[in-house]
Image (spheres, rainbow, N blue to C red):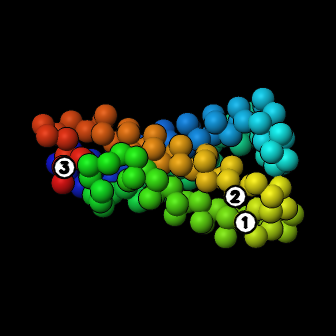
Amino acid sequence: MRNILGWTSLCFTAGLVGGLAGSVLLWMAGSYGWTAAMQVNLAPQWTLDWLFPRLIWGGVWGLLLVPRFLPRSVFWRGLCVSLALTLAQLLVAFPADPDKGLWGLGLGALTPVVVLVVNAVWGWVAALWLVLADDAPRGFSRLR
């Protein structure tokens, strides 16, 4: 992608795909009892009402990938962007709901770990999507 509009739309799509991956992981963790085993009260139901906002917000957060930083490392690039999402969720979104509290500790002591892992998967999948979907001859997203 050589133009900014194409690159921005690719980053949004990458975030959306990452949002789908993170949502699948969180849903599976809840459905298979992994979060309950960690005494974390996160077990969402797979519904459009739950999934759709996660996809859109995943795309919005994917716009953090528009600046090309850490171009040679999908792992670190995805992790860095996911940390911004994780901090926003733990310090802004969860405290807005009195039942969840700061860091989401109202949902269980290991909630920050679950959020960190789910968001890291989001970031890694989004960064990987950029590398795989980029059609530039030398991998524009990787090398510039």
Residue at mark 2: 112
Residue at mark 1: 103
Q: What amino acid does circle 2 point to?
A: Pro
Q: What amino acid does circle 3 point to?
A: Leu
What residue sits 81% from the left and 33% below the top?
33
Please state, as top left, top right, bottom left or bottom right, where the C terminus lies in the image. bottom left
What residue sits 33% from the left and 42% below the top?
130
Circle 1 residues within 10 Å: few <14, some 14–19, many ≥20? many
Q: Which element is circle 3 on?
A: helix
Circle 3 residues within 10 Å: few <14, some 14–19, many ≥20? few
Instruction: Name the disc covering residue 38, or none.
Output: none
Residue 116 location (% of width, % of height): 61, 53
Residue at mark 3: 143
Q: CA distance from mark 1 to mark 3?
A: 36 Å
Compared with residue 83, is residue 133 higher up or lower down, i.e. above or below? above
Q: Quadrant of residue 13?
A: top left
- Residue 127, visible in the rendered structure: yes
Q: What amino acid does circle 1 point to?
A: Trp
Is 7 positioned to the left or the right of 44 in the image?
Answer: left
What residue sits 46% from the left and 53% below the top?
79
What residue sits 25% from the left and 39% below the top?
134
